[in-house]
Structures are given as C-alpha cells and as structure tokens.
Image (tube, helix red, strand yellow):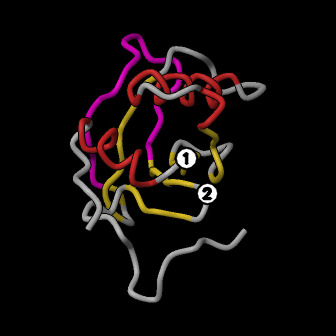
C-alpha cells in the first residue's frame, strides 16, 4: 500500500504522525495486559517518537489491537471504525491509520500534544 506523501516528506511537525491519502497514520507503542489502561504520553523509539498506550486486554486473537483502536477513538472523539492497525499487528510497536480528512484530524491530534499540520 503506497503512502501519498508529497516529495517534500512529512506534512506534520510531529514525527509520530503523518498525513497519508486515507487520513493520518500514528505510531504507537502498546502495552497489553496493563493494570492501568490509557494514554501514557510520548516515548522515544529507535526510529522516532511514538505515543505510548496501555490496554488491559491480552494480545490474543486481535483483542489488544481492537482495544488500542477503541482507546484512540475515545481519545480523539472519532468512531472506532475509522481507526485500524495497519502495521505491527503482532508487535508492540504499531502504526494506526485514522481515516478521514487530515485537516479535521490535525486539531484532534494537537489536543493530544502532537502539533498542527505544517
């Protein structure tokens, strides 16, 4: 699946998310089986920053991935059907796609501390 990023590179100021043709992709690091589920802030990964989040579900049969999508949907006030894990299904480091207009999604991401579109 090709990303529709202009030749200039990323359109966001924050490297944890980027604009793609279908909406926005957000990089996350998940902690399944957590005692305290929720957004845990930003962390630095080997390839750049990620949103750290925790879910109480186990990583079996896609339960943790569905919980991650539901958590992001609640935090961004969008329907869970608009969020999907598109990379890292079996990994703790994932990329989630949030479908929709990037101009509308940018303020939602800014509320979480990710900055605006450049």
Residue position for label 1:
100
In this view, the residue in front, 93 or 115, is 115
* Mark 1 crowdedness (10 Å alpha carbons): few <14, some 14-19, many ≥20: some
In the picture shown, does residue 19 fall above or below 10? above
Q: Earlier in the sequence, mark 2 or mark 1?
A: 2
* Mark 2 crowdedness (10 Å alpha carbons): few <14, some 14-19, many ≥20: some
Quarter-of-image position of residue 44? bottom left
Q: Quadrant of the N terminus?
A: bottom right
Quarter-of-image position of residue 102? bottom left
Is 21 included in the stretch rendered in magenta?
A: no
Say how many tags the image has. 2
Secondary element type, mark 2: loop
Quarter-of-image position of residue 4? bottom right
Residue 81 circle label:
none
Magenta stretch secondary structure, dominant: strand
Q: CA distance from mark 2 to mark 1?
A: 6 Å
Residue position for label 2:
22
Q: What are the residue bounds of the magenta stretch?
A: 28-44
Q: Residue at x 34, y 27 (%)?
A: 39
Extreme-right residue of the structure: 61
The percent coordinates of residue 34 (x first, y second) are 44, 17
Q: Residue at x 57, y 26 (%)?
A: 79
In the picture shown, does residue 107 fall above or below 61? below
The percent coordinates of residue 77 (x first, y second) are 43, 25
Instruction: Please give left or right for residue 71 compared with residue 8 in the image.
Output: right
Instruction: Please give left or right for residue 87 compared with residue 10 in the image.
Output: right
The percent coordinates of residue 116 (x first, y second) are 24, 55
Extreme-top residue of the structure: 35
């Amino acid at each position: 699946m090709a990303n529709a990023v202009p030749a200039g590179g990323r359109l966001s100021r924050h490297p944890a998310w980027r604009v793609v043709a279908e909406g926005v992709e957000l990089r996350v690091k998940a902690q399944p089986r957590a005692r305290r589920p929720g957004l845990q802030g930003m962390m630095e990964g080997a390839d750049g920053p990620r949103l750290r989040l925790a879910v109480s579900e186990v990583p079996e049969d896609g339960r943790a991935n569905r919980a991650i999508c539901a958590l992001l949907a609640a935090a961004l006030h969008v329907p869970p059907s608009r969020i999907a894990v598109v990379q890292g299904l079996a990994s703790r480091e994932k990329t989630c796609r949030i479908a929709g207009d990037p101009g509308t999604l940018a303020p939602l991401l800014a509320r979480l501390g990710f900055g605006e579109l450049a």
